[in-house]
Amino acid sequence: MTVTDEAIAAALMDLAHARGAGKTFCPSEAARALAAEWRPLMPDVRRVASALPLSATQGGAPVDSVAARGPIRLGLR
């Protein structure tokens, strides 16, 4: 099963809006909602997130969602 960028973007924005302003979520939540084998989706999820109105943080500090290594959190800008 191929997951499209549009499906990834929709899942990310649905999660962001469900959490609301000031709240964050792990990008793996979107990947898990899209595929049983979600780990291979993570690079695409991070790439798509970078083009959306989402901010990425790591340890509370802003990071680039694609370049960051390790766990990140995403939230509405």
Image (cartoon, rainbow, N blue to C red):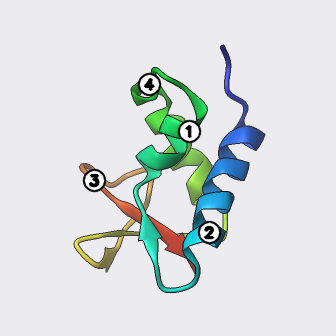
Extreme-bottom residue of the structure: 22
Please identify the quadrant where the N terminus is shown: top right
The amino acid type of the residue labelled 1 equals: Ala
Mark 1 or 4, nearer chain start: 1
Q: Position of residue 45 (x, y in %)?
A: 54, 43
Which mark sits nearer the N-terminus, 1 or 3? Answer: 1
Query: Badge 3 is on which residue?
Result: 71
Name the N-terminal-most of marks 3 and 2: 2
Q: Which amino acid lies under the numbered mark 4 shown in the image of this protein? A: Pro
Q: Earlier in the sequence, mark 2 or mark 1?
A: 2
| Disc with the residue nearer the chain's start (2 vs 4) | 2
> What residue appears at the point 38 percent right and 64 percent down from the top-left corner?
73
Question: How far apart, in angstroms, are the residues tagged by discs 1 and 4?
Answer: 13 Å
Q: Disc 3 vs disc 2: which is toward the camera?
A: 2
Query: Tag 2's secondary structure?
Result: helix
Residue 31, above or below 61: above
Q: Which label's residue is closer to the chain start, 4 or 3?
A: 4
Q: Secondary structure at mark 4?
A: helix
Q: Residue at x 48, y 86 (%)?
A: 22
Provide the residue designation for mark 2.
Answer: 18
* Residue beneath disc 1: 33
Q: Please name the residue shown 46% across and 78% down the image.
A: 23
Q: Is residue 26 left or right of residue 4?
A: left
Q: Nearer the viewer, residue 20 or 7?
A: 20
